[in-house]
Image (cartoon, rainbow, N blue to C red):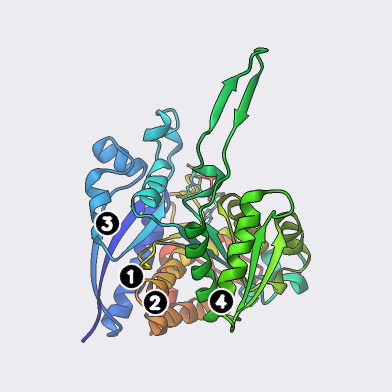
Amino acid sequence: MNKTLNIAVLPGDGIGTEITAQAVRVLRRLSEQGHFSLTLQEAPVGGAGYRASGHPLPESTLKLAKDANAILFGAVGDFSLDTLPRELRPEQAILGLRKELQLFANLRPAMIYPELAGASTLKPEVVSGLDIMIIRELTGDIYFGKPRGVRVLENGEREGFDTMVYRESEIVRIGHVAFQAAQKRNRRVCSVDKANVLETTQLWRDVMTELGKQYPDVELSHMYVDNAAMQLLKNPKQFDVMVTGNMFGDILSDEASMLTGSIGMLPSASLDANNKGLYEPIHGSAPDIAGKNLANPLATMLSAAMMLRYSFGLAQAADAIEAAVRKTLAAGYATGDIYREGCKRVGTVEMGDAVLAALG
Ligand code: NAD
């Protein structure tokens, strides 16, 4: 019997509704083709959540997200709400979901499709064939450590302080995610730290080294974060899986995604300990192009592919989406963000049509 996938769809703001609609079409088509059965339930989040019920993460939306097996998320952000108190701004919804659902592992692939190698700011020979998976710990580190604050010293000068902290168990659980992801790829993990300066990351290195012994089939290396930032630009293809803490991962994953030069192409997953996940494109709500049928829906479709692979173990269905995206790009379809000379310029919906046609 077919697996039933119970998915919460949270389109959010701006282009969020347009791009999730196309990803939902893809999921429905795979369902019609017999890969799985689908239960989709949609709810407002971000600015849409605030407008519907006065909070960016309404109770009913949170409940839906908790009850679902996985979440397909569009994007949040609405400049007209930026004057609200911080806790009511649209972006708080994503932080709230990460915290409430304990989504501690952020997976961000950075890969280049052959047709788009010219879109990178780096030379095509440096990036063509690039396929890296950055795994960032998402719920710990200096972003959450206490104490933190700004205090006034005896001489009247202000001093800001934060606490970098990681428990061994937090390092172990993200480590397992990285080693297991590498087992499905090219079996190499590079753990990124600053063990030469920071005690917390010396512990990080020690724990990763101990954990690595449980995965003799995966080659583990270590790199200091400053060198990692440099190596990503110099020779990014040396990496398979990179794993690192919250702050270093924040910076390195953005750097890596920009190697590909195409913000509309990159998916992401944020997973809990049971592989329940929230799947979203890495870009925001793009208010400048919202409602104009200009947004590239491919990152959201590829996020849906990650969902099928990581939360539902449906590798074949995930492969089908990724193959359809490759075929669509190879056929020359392009939204404005990835347009090159000689391409067929299409809008959001037409890109959806092309991927559906490629899915068969
Ligand atoms: P953005 O990612 O929304 O847009 C940056 C640029 O990329 C814009 O020119 C936009 O038109 C373009 N772009 C983004 N996605 C695209 C797509 N799919 N197809 C074609 N072009 C695309 O970043 P921003 O403009 O800095 O932020 C806009 C809003 O999004 C802000 O409110 C911000 O806080 C929010 N944001 C949300 C998330 C999220 O929901 N996870 C992430 C980043 C930013």
Mark 4 lies on residue:
182
Q: Nearer the viewer, residue 40 or 264?
A: 40
Q: Nearer the viewer, residue 332 or 187?
A: 187
Secondary structure of residue under mark 2: helix
On the question of residue 281 being in view, the answer is no
Mark 1 lies on residue:
25
Secondary structure of residue under mark 1: helix
Q: To which quarter of the image does residue 358 belong? A: bottom left
Pick the quarter of the image with the N terminus.
Answer: bottom left
| Marks 2 and 1 in Cβ contact (< 8 Å) | yes
Could you give the CA–CA distance between mark 3 and mark 1, rounded to whole angstroms?
23 Å
Q: Mark 2 belongs to which amino acid?
A: Leu
> Closer to the N terminus: mark 4 or mark 2?
4
Residue 229 pos. (x, y %): 72, 57
Q: Mark 3 belongs to which amino acid?
A: Lys
Mark 3 lies on residue:
66
Mark 2 lies on residue:
356
